[in-house]
Amino acid sequence: MPQVTATTSPAAISSRQQQLGNDNTDGVFIQPLVDSAGNPSKVTLFGPPTGAAAGTLNSGLQVTGGANAALTRGTAGGMVATFATTATPAAIATLTSAEVTLTPVLGSGAMVTVTTTDILVLNKPTSQAGLGYGNVRYASSSTIALSFNNITAGTLTPTTTQIYGVVALRGLGAATTTLTPAAVATKTTAEQLFTVSGIRAGELVIVNKPTTNVGLDIVGCRVAGNNQIGITFANFTAGTLTPTAAEAYTIQSLGGVDAASAVLLAQIPIVGGTIATVTTAEITLTSGNYAAQDVPIGVSKPTLQQGLIAGSVRLASSTTMGVTFANPTAGTLTPTAAEVLGIAIDRQAPAAPVVIYSPTLTPTSVAANTTAEQTFTVTGLIAGSPVWVNKPTAQAGLGIVGARVSAASTLAINFLNTTAGTLTPTAAEVYTVGNFQMPIDTTTGNSWIQPAVPALTAAATLANALRSNDVSLGIFTGS
């Protein structure tokens, strides 16, 4: 270990302090001594506190009690819920936007439904030229509202009986912020910037507008900087339109959500089945999201049926769970049709609820007055899972009106061009892509709930920020 020497103290350091250094890069070993009263020497790495008088001693690495409470303790848990719903939306007239309602949970008695404070994401399973969709919002505990938009010269009808994927995020620090956007000119898109506390550069941002404005839609959002978001509004009509003033938007900023528990909750509606007198029988619950090593822990039936007993549950096949019912009565009994059963499942090494990707994409041109879906390779995207995309810059006349994972590691983005000329999205931009890794179920009415711990997310955010700061100060190496 090299010898540490004391150098002449600069004016900003008191006569009681010493500046330590040596002539090599092996580092400095410091062993605090004690004074005559038995008090250890204080150690500081960064000099006097900002604004302190010369000679003021900074306690540096010493613990200072409650001031170290950088993370809030005792916070409630959160969740990421993925729903599957079949929808047949009505036709969308030319040069406008129109809102339709979707029912994310079918059946009665579901334990988890959407709430007013949830942040919502929706994916349509296919793309249709000229047709897009934008804002999604809470409508009731059993329905959400989705804005479709049509920039073409003719009426367009969304494909019938498709299974849409809906994600509801709860308890992950979404902000409710009152915004008053400016007017949006005819047949164009325009980004507007807003200050929102808690937004962090480099993260994914999701925006839900609480009401619809006919002819207007949200066709993009991004983190414009710390505590600042950009929202791109589109006006599909022949006149200027202004979004409703002083509305409480719901906004979520995410750097990813870690898997917090091996226990998942599946909500599966009962479809058919009767239990004969004085016997047991198994009713199957179908889902495309069961895993080979899933261990069902138990089943919950939300209502009481006299004489009917819900018993054990097992993984019967790769796509079915079997629930055993007992009927000790003198007559045949039928479990309530379409009632949603809750199945607690222990899954080894479950996927993270949300993973963020930062791919560099170079889209091709988009023709005038239409939408066009383009695909890109983003290694790691889960086949059939929901996705949300932030374009890093805004371009007048361009927007994003749909995204989906069209195949494993394949991202499909539906670009919108509201103008009368061809437009090309900026080349080689780094997009922010949020992948909600629970696939959209192949059976409508099914939903899957993944638990999340907000404290884990907050701790990871703080740790990354501290490391980034220490790298910038030269304390750590790396980027």
Image (cartoon, rainbow, N blue to C red):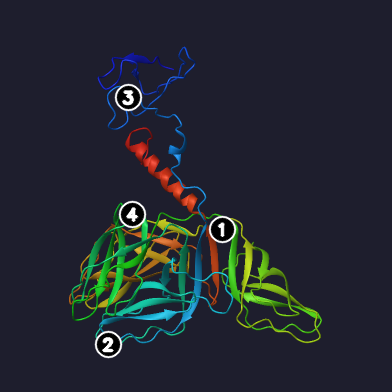
Q: Where is residue 143 in the image (x, y as percent from the top left)?
A: 46, 77
Residue carrying label 1? 350
Q: What element carries label 2?
A: loop
Residues marked 4 and 2 touching at CB (< 8 Å): no
Residue 333 in the image: above or below residue 247? below
Q: Nearer the viewer, residue 47 or 117?
A: 117
Residues marked 4 and 1 touching at CB (< 8 Å): no
Give the CA separation, mark 4 to mark 1.
Answer: 32 Å
Q: Is residue 428 left or right of residue 381?
A: left
Residue at (37, 35) in percent of width and height: 477
Q: Is mark 3 on a helix, strand or loop?
A: loop
Give the CA separation, mark 3 to mark 2.
Answer: 74 Å
Q: In this view, does 433 lie to the left or right of 446?
A: left
Q: Which amino acid does label 3 sit on?
A: Thr
Tell me if I can see residue 410 in this picture. Answer: yes
Residue at (44, 29) in percent of width and height: 62
Residue carrying label 4? 197
Q: Which of 61 and 322 is in front in this view?
A: 61
Q: What residue type is labelled 1?
A: Pro
Residue carrying label 3? 56
Q: Compare marks 4 and 1 and give the one earlier in the sequence.
A: 4
Residue 15 in the image: above or below residue 161? above
Q: What residue type is labelled 2?
A: Gly
Q: Which mark's residue is nearer the viewer, 3 or 2?
A: 3
Q: Compare marks 4 and 2 and give the one earlier in the sequence.
A: 2
Q: Compare marks 3 and 4 and give the one earlier in the sequence.
A: 3
Q: Compare marks 1 and 2 and give the one earlier in the sequence.
A: 2
Q: Where is residue 178 in the image (x, y as percent from the top left)?
A: 31, 64
